[in-house]
Amino acid sequence: MRAAGSLGVFDLVAISRAGVRLVQAKTNRGPSRAESARLAAFDNLPPNATRELWLFRDSLRNPQIEVLR
């Protein structure tokens, strides 16, 4: 899946019986202040939902995953 130039707050929404994961994916740098503010504004989620930032760095195989509180 590729979501380059995504226009929504999150690049990926994963839904299962266990819960909902809202993922913002970035490459080599974190979100800007404006993006961080949009992510933080999404705060009225059900208890089984998480907001996550996945940071893919060129030199690493797996992303750094941060669950946003």
Image (cartoon, rainbow, N blue to C red):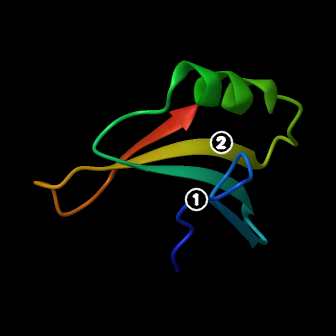
State the separation of the CA atoms marked 1 and 2.
Answer: 19 Å
Residue shown at 74% from the left, 52% from the top? 8
Is residue 69 visible in the rendered image? The answer is no
Q: Are marks 1 and 2 in contact (CB under 8 Å)?
A: no
Residue shown at 61% from the left, 31% from the top? 35
Q: Is residue 67 left or right of residue 29?
A: right
Q: Is residue 66 left or right of residue 58?
A: right
Is residue 20 visible in the rendered image? The answer is yes
Q: Is residue 39 above or below residue 22?
A: above
Of discs 1 and 2, which sits in the foreground?
1
Label 1 Cα neighbours within 10 Å, binned few <14 / some 14-19 / many ≥20:
few
Q: Is residue 49 above or below residue 34?
A: below
Expressed as whole percent of the image width and height from the top left, the position of residue 67 reads 53, 37
Expressed as whole percent of the image width and height from the top left, the position of residue 3 reads 57, 68
Which residue lies under the disc numbered 2?
51
Q: Mark 1 or mark 2, which has the lower sequence index?
A: 1
The mark found on residue 5 in the picture is 1
Q: Is residue 54 left or right of residue 14?
A: left
Rendered image quadrant of residue 14: bottom right
Amino acid on which the number 1 mark rests in the picture: Gly
Amino acid on which the number 2 mark rests in the picture: Arg
In the image shown, does 31 or 18 lie closer to the viewer?
Answer: 31
Q: Is residue 52 above or below residue 42?
A: below
Q: Quadrant of the C terminus?
A: top right
The mark found on residue 65 in the picture is none
Label 2 Cα neighbours within 10 Å, binned few <14 / some 14-19 / many ≥20:
many
In the image shown, does 67 or 23 lie closer to the viewer?
Answer: 23
Disc 2 is placed on an element classified as: strand
Residue shown at 72% from the left, 29% from the top? 38
Disc 1 is placed on an element classified as: loop
In the image shown, does 7 or 58 lie closer to the viewer?
Answer: 7
Q: Is residue 37 left or right of residue 3?
A: right
